[in-house]
Amino acid sequence: METEKTTGLESHTQAQTAEKWRKYLLPVGLLLLFLLNILIFMEKFGFNFVNRYYKGILILTFINIILAVSLNLINGITGLFSIGHAGFMAVGAYVSALLSINMGEWGFLPPQIQSIIEFPLVLILGGLAAAFAGLLIGVPTLRLRGDYLAIATLGFGEIIRVVALNLGITRGARGIPGIPNHTNFWWAQFFAVITVVIIWNIVRSNHGRAMAAIREDEMAAEAMGVNITYYKVLSFTIGAFFAGLAGGLFAHYLSYIAPRSFDVLKTIEILLMVVLGGLGSITGSVIAAVVLTALPEVLRFLQAYRMVIYAGTLVLLMIFRPQGLFGRAEVDLTVFQALKSRAAEKTKSQPGERGGNGDSA
Amino acid sequence: MVTVTLLKVEDLSISFGGLRAVSGFNLDLKPGELVGLIGPNGAGKTTVFNILTGFYQPQEGRIFFDGTEITGLGCHKINRLGIGRTFQNIRLFNELTVLENVKIAYQYAGRYSWGDAIFRTRVFHRHEKEITDWALSRLDIFNLAGKADEIAKNLPYGEQRRLEIARALAGRPRLLLLDEPAAGMNPQETVELLELIRWLRQEFSLTILLIEHDMSLVMKLCERILVLDYGMTIAEGSPEKIRNNPRVIEAYLGEEVS
Ligand SMILES: Nc1ncnc2c1ncn2[C@@H]1O[C@H](COP(=O)(O)OP(=O)(O)OP(=O)(O)O)[C@@H](O)[C@H]1O
Ligand SMILES: [Mg+2]
């Protein structure tokens, strides 16, 4: 149907309702998150509102948000086509798990302090290992013109799997059990929020604009002074880093990892979130990650029909909204900007306040 | 040392398979010159641009820009040295806004680190403001400031052409390569464009190399013209000389050269 097309020709009213809706999305989302935090915080006082099962889903949701948003940076913002996200996840998972298991006492720090620092440190090291793997694949393939990345990343995912199956230290198909289950709601939320903020800020900077330019027209981007190899490799490496981080969270949540947790299906699951949310929309990726993690659980009462309905919903969505839920749109931040400028005005009108910074005193 | 030539091209040649698209191309551009590059379809004009801007590596020949050799340099490096261009088939960043299109071309000038971007430091805000102001001022020149937030692909054709020039200028080039900027424009728009190019050249002391099919435009605008045919330079000189050159007339085979 031609009339259904919305390529910038959306009727005014339609666009306006969409605007309004987007304006409330972030405040409402943050409010819900805040309430959730309170509910879970109440545990400290003996109130268990959220049981283990639901908390598990929440943790997986946060992990999936990290995965979807980071893949979106590569595939949606920069316009590359990576299908190896599960591979980077695996690198992060294995590296951080093995570090956690084999790390003894450091000695130079008191054990209490070590136990606080150790987990985030191990996660970041897992992320860096994944980023390094990304660099190794990205540099040779992204320098070439044309889409070699898809093939290379697909191959990479398989190589990682085969290596994990055959290496002594990864214990083959039996996998690694007994990983300390450090990943709780707070850590998962913390890293998910950090990931979203960092990638959001990257996208809305000259670095992100350079990436978007590459997606739009590689040749024109180059002719306008954009170092396309640099930005492609960095986008890919940053995406790999966060996939590795998510892998670490995943390993320390399940306490057990095996090569089959990171097969191509896992990549497709993440890719689905990105496409469903809208290639290039961070908001879309976050919401799609929430929906697609929760949906199979919500539909659990349907038993065998569950996956049929799940798949059917996706097919319908792709038919009626091929650009994804959000297209390239994002949450509307004007509410917050208005608050900010109002606050700024207040401080300005205060007597005795001077514009200069106080370092010349 | 004063450079008397801004761009010096020596014996440039390139072949695609068996086809010699450009052979033995020579060019000297003095600062401030406005030179036309004309020739029938497939003569190799766009290919010359693509070599000058680093998209193609020439098989023979050397290119000097402002005294330094740029042969074999990467595209973005050549752009940053001061060569801007537009494309024969408009190549805007279609899904981005008009403002973003221009900001991308200028961004390296207001450079801040990844850390500045991630932590939104003061440096970030200062540079972003500078980039935005600059981009808006470029749009203003082209009467596009009112459309800064529109998606580039939704602009009418003539405005897309102007946006491409605005974008090319945002990187502060000293040499501007225009590939058929009037293609697809109506006579009224073409006249306006002609005025604009003259004005830009004065205002920004630009050196311009222009490919154009519209003969009357080239003849009016350029003080010197090069004619390519099958990759060879068959004539060079003032508009009058070119107009009466039998080889040029022959190359255009009855096409109007006046
Ligand atoms: N990348 C390429 N691969 C193969 N052949 C090419 C390539 N680029 C250009 N050519 C060929 O080189 C010749 C010159 O092309 P070019 O685009 O430079 O012509 P032009 O003078 O710009 O023509 P027009 O007026 O139609 O734009 C043509 O025969 C074209 O097919
Ligand atoms: Mg051409």
Image (cartoon, rainbow, N blue to C red):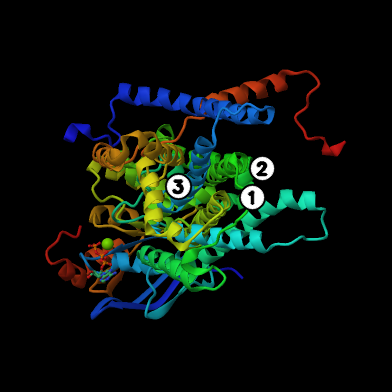
Location of residue A22 in the rendering, given as x and y in whole percent from the top left corner: 43, 27
**B143 or A163: which is nearer to us?**
A163
Residue flagged by tag 3: what amino acid is it? Ala
Q: Which residue is mark 1?
A: B115
Q: Is mark 2 within 8 Å of ligand 1?
A: no
Front disc: 1 or 3: 3
Residue found 25% across the figure and 38% down from its top? A316
Is there a contact, CB below 8 Å, between mark 1 and mark 3? no
The amino acid at mark 2 is Thr
Q: Chain of mark 3?
A: A
B220 or A44, nearer to the observer: A44
* Residue depicted at 59% across the width and 57% down the height: A178
N-term mark: 2 or 1: 1
Quadrant in which the C terminus of chain B appears: bottom left
Q: Secondary structure at mark 3?
A: helix
Q: Which residue is mark 3?
A: A68
The crowding category of the residue bearing disc 2, from other C-alpha atoms within 10 Å (few below 14, some 14 to 19, many at least 20), is: few
Q: CA distance from mark 1 to mark 3?
A: 23 Å
Q: In the displayed image of the protein, which residue is found farthest to the left? A: B254
Quarter-of-image position of residue B40: bottom left
Q: Which residue is mark 2?
A: B121
Regarding ligand 2, which quadrant of the image does it lie in?
Answer: bottom left
